[in-house]
Image (cartoon, coloured by chain):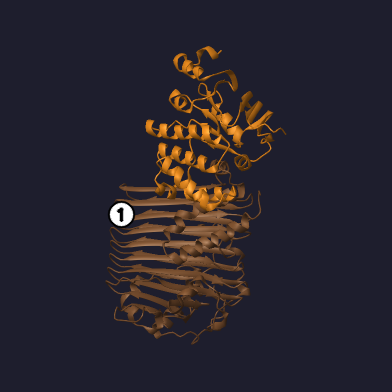
Amino acid sequence: MNPFPNQIKDIFPDTASISEARNSALEKLSKTEFPKPEQEVWKYSKIFDLDLKSLSPSLESPDGSKTKASFLDIVESDLVEISDGWLTSGKGNHSSGDSGVYVGSLANTDAYLTNFEKHLIEPKDFFDCLNRSYNPETLLIQIPNGVTLESPIYIKVQSVTSGSVTCPRVIVSLGENSAATIIEHHLSGSGESLSVPVLDAYVGQNSRLKHCVLQDLGKKTWQVSKQNFQLEKDSYLEIFTGAFGGDYARSEIRCELKGRGSEAYLSAAYFGNEEQTLDFRTFQKHEAPNTTSKLLFKGALDGDSRSIYSGLIKVLPEAVRTKAQQTNRNIKLSENAWAESVPNLEIETNDVVCTHASTVAGIDEEQLFYLESKGIETSLAERLIIAGFFDDVISQAGDSLLVGEATSKLTEILGNRFMGQGG
Amino acid sequence: MTNEKFLNIEGLCAKAGDKKVLNGIDIQIKPSEVHAIMGPNGSGKSTLAHVLMGRPGYEVTSGSISIDGVDVLSLQTWQRAQAGMFIVMQQPIEVPGVKISDLLTEVAVASELDPQESLSLLREEAANLKIDESLLDRELNVDLSGGEKKRNETLQLLVSKAKYAILDEIDSGLDVDSLALVAERINRAAKSDQLGVLAITHFNRLLDILEPDQVHVLVDGRIVETGSAELALQLEKDGYQKFLK
């Protein structure tokens, strides 16, 4: 079911092949149903409250003056900016030189057609199809064999037009023996909007990718985000999600360990407030022997906010000697806050070490008593405990700009939360 | 309110749930005095320490606790600490992600200590206790050895400028050398800095160094005998048999 008029011919700067892909996505979208409450993958979500009729897709590149302030603005010319799904600025310095690194519009290169297309995951559900149909311009980041990027690629992904459906799309392809770090900041205005970002990342043999997203969307923004990672032999992936904003913000992370010896480390920090719903669905799929994945998602829920963590570790029969972990920890800071945590294992071989754990609890009373007994007042002790709770996942993100921003965001939230209490 | 300075525990009764755990405790600790509490397991020693500090889970049913004439029963835990009480817990709690230095900074701020002064005091006391300064960057009690935990607690006690220290089996988990280091420093704090000490222990090797003025025997939430340091020696020899019904 396509909720939007189909007349988008010649609106987007497509090449022939992109146009073909778009048309096929549109056709698929028209035959794909909107999520239904009985579908397990949408359980606990509030997607059914989404009123698509009041929104419309972004069909023109927004006015440059509408840009939102981001902690990434500091990197200036190196910043890649995606506004309402359009590539509005920055190919950065990464495209230049002889290294063959490409950061820019997919429409301006033929490179990916030969290299990456076969790895792209077919659009499956409604939001995949929506993204493929209405993504104006795709950002392609391509790192050739043997190239290590010295500095991160910073991407500002913003929804600036009220009432819009925005479909940013990023494709990352790392060749063999290469390395890159990508940092995304997702933000939006105060009006209602829906953002449907899709990331497809392919990590070639013996390569390393670090990918971080800090989501600080406006209070009325809905987001359904998808990230697909594919890991080849001996490759290494670290990903981090910091989720603080949005009305309903969902993040689906799919990590396929396809090559022997590949490793993936997934972490997230989230803080829900007021009526927010933060929704995480993860999939650690082990397809090859000696693969490792570790997931640690930590969240705090305040006010009437809700979080959902639902994760699956799947180990195929051939993925012997898999090591997999899945841990979700939640701190509930108010009576009305609600956290659902559903870890799942599906293991088809014996020779594995897999663990999963999940907790939903208030602030630890022993820790609180301990800090208070040192003369630290209750509200400050609570702040210290919560900041400490997030410390490992946030510091794992590594990039100093991102860690700085996530930390100050958290400090701001905790400052507001515990202001003037107990004094 | 009186002008007399002491930690005054008077007729203190408490329960945990429906169970009576303290049945009328009277102890007065003056500045510089060292009091020891001994007793069989389950007699209420740690409970007394926790009730003094206002740990949740206990209800004081009668009696009073005051510091230098100020009632502390109505105070929250952190206020009791700011009023001058310091507890060294038997098992210091792990607080992941919070560095020892973070805690010390917050304590200094809360106590309105001069940051420069408190830093130099910290360095001096760390050296006294043979604590490597790199320990201060570690997370609170996470992956610390028993000795490191107790030396760290002692360091916090000394820089907090507390008036009364409640030591709940500070000797547990400490090797002989660390025990001597910690106990001698606390003894010195009592003698020269007027620290009042309530030391809960099973062992004389701590008391040999702390030199208690009084030793109390706690059985079933009651003090059944009070005596001098001699009493501790006698207990070590004869056990608690004669106090048990």
Residue type highlighted by circle 1: Ala
Among the 4 quarters of the image, the one containing residue A238? bottom left
For residue A86, above or below residue B73: below
Residue A418 placement (x, y as % from top left) = 62, 54
Which chain's colour is orange? B
Q: Residue furthest front?
A: B192
For residue B221, above or below residue A25: above
Q: Nearer the viewer, residue A241 or A421?
A: A421
Disc 1, SS: loop
Q: Residue at x 40, y 83 (%)?
A: A107
Give left or right: position of B26 versus A285: right
Which chain's colour is brown? A
Q: Residue at x 44, y 78 (%)?
A: A138
Residue B101 placement (x, y as % from top left) = 48, 50
- Please give the residue where the numbered disc 1 appears in the rendered image: A319
Residue B163 placement (x, y as % from top left) = 58, 37
Q: Is residue A233 visible?
A: yes
